[in-house]
Image (tube, rainbow, N blue to C red):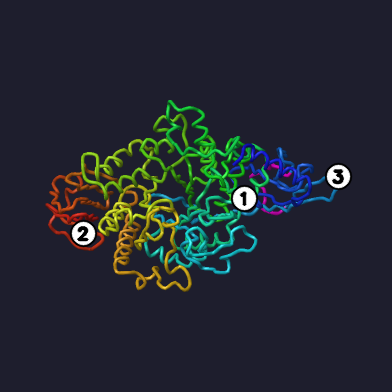
Amino acid sequence: MRSKFLLAVFYLFISAAVSGQIPALERVEPAFWWAGMKNPELQLIVHGKNIADREASISYPGVTLKGVNKVENPNYLFLDLELSPDVAPGTFSISFNKKGQKRLSYNYTLKARDTSPNRIQGVTSKDFIYLIMPDRFANGDKKNDVIKGMKETALNRDSMYYRHGGDIQGIIDHLDYLKDLGVTALWLNPVLENDQPKTSYHGYANTENYQIDPRFGTNELYRKLVDECHARGMKMIKDLVHNHLGSEHWTIKDLPSKDWIHQWPSYTKSSFRDQVLFDPYAAESEKKQMTDGWFDVHMPDMNQANPYVKKYFTQSHIWWIEFAGLDGFRLDTYAYNDPVFMAEWAKEIKREYPRFTFFAETWVHGVPNQVFFTQGNTVNRGFDTGLPGVTDFQSLWAINETLNGKFGWDEGVTRLYTTTASDFVYQDATRNVMFLDNHDLSRFYSVVGEDLNKYKSGIAWLLTTRGIPQMYYGTEILMKNFSNPDGLVREDFKGGWPGDKVNKFRPDGRTERENDAFNYVRTLANYRKNNEVLQTGKLMQYVPENGVYVYFRYNTDKTVMVIMNTGDKEETLKIARFNERTAGFNAAVNIVSGESLPSFTQLTVPAKTTWVLELKK
């Protein structure tokens, strides 16, 4: 990107506006709001040709126009409204007048809030999250596969880079499959409009903040998906990107001001070095590049110190919670955001929705690095981020080392033990999201060398350890591949498209090995769903010996013992070592196989095998 490119683009669009190439009143966002919100402030972003030349006015009981803000670009106005606590739902006119010219107006609606008890519940350690890339899961409506007028109209299931046609209706059609599997919450990769010229399927370069991509469906269909989840006792998590927008976003194509995004003399990419944020010896220039550098050339980095950017993002997120009844957010690329803004954002969300929860992607190496971003100021960051939990990459690295490494003082399963032992640094590690793979990582089944015993050990750990377990779509049926490139781990779920030769959603479409894996996940996930001991029970772990790691989940009602033998030969355990947790029990039941173990003085566990046992008296 050549020097001064962005400034040239900015002034080009200013010139275009003056010459009459932009409609008189293009949009008002958010397009509507709700009466009775806890925060009485509402800022509207108004866009249209030379709209700043007009005088704005509102006349509606309980609505006060507190301020009219102009910015560098005359095509924008930012209106500050104050809504009284008793303002009535209804529609009123926002007028934009200029002497000698035709009056412009926008009919603005304040809706009544939906107070249904099962809305906006939050996602906790009681849940089991299933991550779906919507374009690759199931195609429930072929009519929206290609939308004329959008910048990308290629549709090719044989290409990992083009869109494949998966959509929201396809997810709705398979909710019963997910419920049967034991899933209690869905996390979808972003579903906002991504009208980018290429590779728009992944969703992380949105071009609208208030519209679902029409190739996935409509806003109303998305809300129906959330309702259908709630009707099945399931929750919905929306994936958010604070750090950047797509280069085709309407505010990027017509910048409100030069400081809407981070500008550089020439294209500057983020260093992606999280260490500089907490390094006491780091240069300020390197901190700036980490947070203000662009994620990619088509993903402009937002200036989150700009007060209008702050409002625009925060209000759009609140809007989606209220509109759809969401239960949680996953926050993408969290480490690259302005930390002050993110702390303010967290307070705003929690103030409006005390039960609402969110967790963030912090793709870093090292427990302190990860804890640095979490709430509580537990590592002397100097302020509280307000971030409840993160996607726990440190535990991911540890379980991979456990299953693929050789046991030693620091290696193999010892790393899993020591990583878990570091939980004292968090305010509450049970708010972390535990996972084996996702849309950016190699598939877990491939990572463990397509070894079914190792796979089952990883699944057993995922569904019995502390925190909130998350599974990537298809992991339950042994979908495989390495993330080189990413598209290889984003393949279609076979059976999700009309005409597929096999249907992996059904037992008769899966191989014997796939059904074995599916049933293993299903059995453990449903046991977890129905037993609080694996949701909120305490955890006690023992130092691994001879490659065997033993830990317990327990409460006043039940005790579950997990024995993970990572070695290449069977090992015999004397139960007396674990007397602190096993005292009073004289038998056990294998939760997966249903087998009873009446003799409980010693156990011989086969090689590369994990047992999940409910202890009995």
Residue 248 is marked as 1
What type is the residue that disc 1 sits on? Glu
What residue did someone put label 2 on? 589
Query: Does residue 358 sit above or below 343 in this rendering?
Result: below
Mark yes or no: residue 533 visible. no
What's the residue type where badge 2 is placed? Val
Asked if the stretch drawn in magenta spans residue 475, the answer is no
Q: Earlier in the sequence, mark 1 or mark 2?
A: 1
Specify few, some or many for label 1: CA neighbours under 10 Å numbering under 14, 14-19, or 20 or more. many
Whole-number angstrom distance, CA of label 1 to CA of label 2: 57 Å
The front one of 170 and 228 is: 170
Q: Is residue 125 above or below residue 384?
A: below
Residue 230 is situated, as x and y percent measured from the top left of the image, at 47, 60
For residue 99, the mark is: 3
Residue with the most extreme right position: 100
Give the x, y percent position of residue 149: 65, 61
